[in-house]
Amino acid sequence: MKLVANKRSLLQFLRWAQRALFAGGLLALGYCGFVLIDSWLFQQRASEELERRLGSERAGRSASEQPVALPPAIGADGLIGRLQVQRLGLSAIVFENTDRKTLRRATGHIPRTGFPGEPGNIGIAGHRDSFFRPLKDIAKEDVITLTTLRGEFRYRVVSMRVVAPTEVSVLNPTANEVLTLVTCYPFYFVGSAPERFIVRAERVM
């Protein structure tokens, strides 16, 4: 009788565990779906807003007879522009900051690094499993385009390397116009990736 009771208890436990795992799986899938849809909608809205502002900026310049001052590098809402690598099919809106919420929805300009059109090192970060996944196939001479309210800026890739997360010298200021893309590495690592993949590009005049 004791053996039968133990078997019954074990079966009940297994059934409970199965249901709990199934429910957990559904919740995880639901969350992943929410994140994907939320980031897609955010990118769509931000892209439309960027195009609207670009149109207004062009119209203002055409209508003015006087030299027009450059618009701010960062919009009031944090919008900076759009980053594209045409060969890789990479296109992502860039916002100021690299906090969790920003990087879930966009790529992030690293605070205290440079801005397009100015001498210095522009740092932009993105997740390896979303917007920056295409960087696994990037190559030297690829062209990266940054479209902002200040204009369109093009950069040619000169190097790629893997560094430790503590290697912050990759973001050091530079005398010339440089763009540095940062993402986690390896690209398909499960869990918190131990290294960083760095793409360095120089302004094409």
Image (cartoon, rainbow, N blue to C red):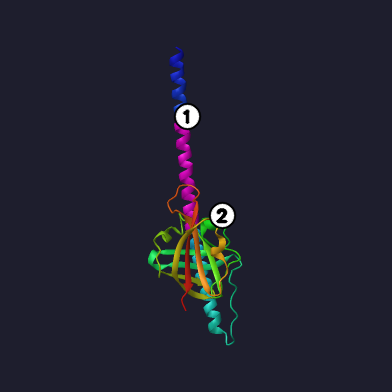
Residue positioned 47% across, 37% down in the render = 23
Check disc 1 and report its element: helix, strand or loop. Answer: helix
Indicate whether 65 appears above or below 18: below
- Find residue 80 and report its horizontal and vertical position in percent: 55, 68
38 inside magenta stretch: yes
Q: Which mark is residue 16?
A: 1
| Figure quadrant of residue 115 | bottom right
Q: Is residue 153 magenta?
A: no
Q: Position of residue 158 (x, y in %)?
A: 44, 69
Residue 108, position as x, y percentages in the image: 54, 62
Q: Quadrant of the N terminus?
A: top left
Magenta span: chief secondary structure:
helix
Q: Residue at x 56, y 80 (%)?
A: 60
Between marks 1 and 2 in the image, the one whose residue lies nearer the viewer? 2
- Which label sits on residue 100? 2
Q: Residue 55, percent across and down?
A: 51, 75
Query: Foreground residue, 168 or 48?
Result: 168
Q: Residues within 10 Å of mark 1 (few under 14, many from 20)?
A: few
- Looking at the rendering, the stretch of residues picked out in magenta corresponds to 16-40
Q: Residues within 10 Å of mark 2 (few under 14, many from 20)?
A: few
Tag 2: residue type? Arg
| Label 2 SS | helix
Q: Does 169 sit above or below residue 118?
A: above
Task: Name, please, the residue furthest toward the top.
Answer: 1
In the rendered image, the vertical position of residue 149 relative to residue 19, given as above or below = below
Q: Which kind of residue does numbered mark 1 sit on?
A: Trp
Q: Earlier in the sequence, mark 1 or mark 2?
A: 1
Relative to 82, is 138 on the left or the right? left
